[in-house]
């Protein structure tokens, strides 16, 4: 007899796409990969098949390395792109800056410099200014620019802006990394392929996420150049990102990116976010950011936010958004349903009525 779950299997919310479970097709892939013996440390047929699938997306010459976490993917990728004395430019909202516990600084020894943004997006002119400002023996020269697609504020970089950012960065001798924890959501939103938003534009390294889009432990770094590939593969192990039973990570990623599952899951999350935004606005609440992927940001009175979040989990993003309001973040997942959206809308209407 199986044990009872340690959580309510019917619990739902909008706290994060990390809170969702694994897609059934990913779970099936894990079961299929189990049993029998295969080579360890990436010498297995699942990793080989994943490598081929990723080249279909990102280009025949690209190389990849399976890792365990999104933070690990960013740290490994940016170490591979920079020298020890260099710095990395990042959005002032970036995960590497605020939510990775200084991982890049601690593990890679690389300084992170924040760039101003509008709705989470970096402007090429600010890259130029930052590179020029760092051109001094007293400062850490810029080695790489990291961009988050979709951004921490749920917005997406359009192809033309990405192209400009890569062009400017490369002209200045700066390499470009994309934190693609939600790259699938951005690609679906923009009607583009994964490579169209990255390597096809000259992006040097991509942290491709599967965890937030139906995987469990499913991340991989893709690089464009052979020279970077050697650095990448030598960094995975000492960065503590290599699993001995790599087949189980690769099997998840292969289920997502070896088929159209990544597109179906991201599309479902994006559609749910669009419905959620409409429901929030219909309740009389103002959304504060463009809704372009699977996140909705909105403005609420603090007491309303606290009561609503106690009933349906979500997070306060900016507790001092205005003198009288907080900004909240609601994230839709691949398994968000119409009932989830309407249930939250009903809770929100009730709490707004209470004042």
Image (cartoon, rainbow, N blue to C red):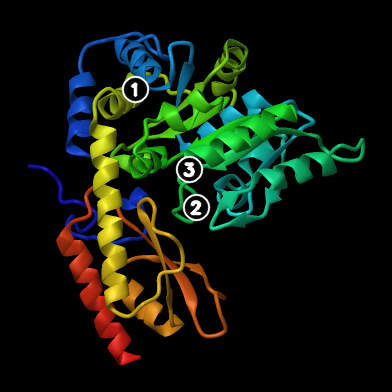
Residue carrying label 1:
250
List the residue tagged with mark 2. Answer: 152
Relative to residue 2, is residue 146 drawn left or right? right
Image spot of residue 230 (x, y percent):
59, 12
Q: CA distance from mark 1 to mark 2?
A: 26 Å
Question: Which disc is residue 216 wearing?
Answer: none
Q: Which mark is residue 158?
A: 3
Q: Earlier in the sequence, mark 1 or mark 2?
A: 2
**Badges 3 and 2: C-beta atoms under 8 Å apart?**
no
Percent of width and height locating residue 246: 38, 20
Identify the residue at horizontal 43%, vertical 14% (top origin).
41
Residue found at the very far front of the displayed protein = 160
Q: Is residue 107 above or below residue 326?
A: above
Depth check: give the residue in front, 239 or 61.
61
Badge 2 local density, few (<14 within 10 Å), some, or many (20+)? some
From this view, report whether residue 280 is shown above or below residue 275: below
Which marked residue is nearer to the observer: mark 3 or mark 2?
Answer: 3
Q: Nearer the viewer, mark 3 or mark 1?
A: 3
How many badges with numbers are in the image?
Answer: 3
């Amino acid at each position: 007899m199986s044990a009872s779950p340690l959580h309510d299997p019917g619990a739902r919310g909008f706290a994060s796409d990390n809170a969702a479970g694994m897609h059934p097709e990913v779970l099936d892939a894990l079961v299929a990969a189990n049993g029998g013996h295969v080579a360890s440390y990436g010498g297995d047929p699942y990793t080989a098949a994943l490598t081929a699938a990723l080249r279909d997306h990102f280009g025949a010459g690209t190389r990849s390395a399976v890792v365990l976490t999104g933070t690990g993917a960013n740290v490994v990728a940016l170490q591979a792109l920079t020298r020890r004395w260099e710095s990395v430019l990042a959005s002032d909202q970036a995960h590497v800056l605020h939510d990775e516990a200084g991982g890049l600084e601690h593990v890679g020894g690389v300084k992170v410099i924040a760039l101003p943004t509008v709705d989470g997006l970096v402007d090429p002119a600010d890259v130029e200014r930052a590179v020029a400002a760092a051109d001094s023996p007293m400062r850490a020269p810029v080695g790489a620019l990291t961009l988050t697609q979709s951004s921490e504020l749920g917005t997406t970089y359009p192809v033309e802006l990405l192209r400009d950012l890569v062009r400017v960065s490369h002209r200045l001798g700066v390499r470009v990394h994309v934190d693609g924890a939600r790259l699938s959501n951005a690609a679906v939103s923009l009607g583009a392929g994964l490579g169209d938003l990255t390597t096809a534009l000259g992006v040097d390294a991509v942290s491709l996420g599967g965890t937030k889009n139906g995987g469990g432990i499913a991340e991989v770094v893709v690089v464009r150049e052979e020279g970077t590939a050697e650095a990448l593969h030598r960094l995975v192990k000492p960065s503590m990102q290599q699993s001995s039973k790599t087949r189980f990570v690769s099997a998840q990623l292969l289920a997502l990116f070896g088929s159209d599952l990544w597109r179906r899951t991201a599309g479902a999350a994006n559609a749910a976010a669009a419905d959620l935004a409409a429901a929030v606005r219909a309740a009389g609440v103002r959304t504060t950011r463009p809704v372009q992927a699977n996140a909705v940001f909105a403005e609420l009175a603090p007491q309303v936010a606290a009561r609503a979040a106690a009933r349906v989990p979500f997070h306060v993003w900016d507790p001092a958004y205005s003198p009288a309001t907080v900004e909240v973040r609601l994230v839709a997942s691949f398994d968000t349903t119409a009932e989830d959206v309407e249930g939250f809308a009903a809770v929100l209407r009730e709490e707004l009525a209470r004042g």
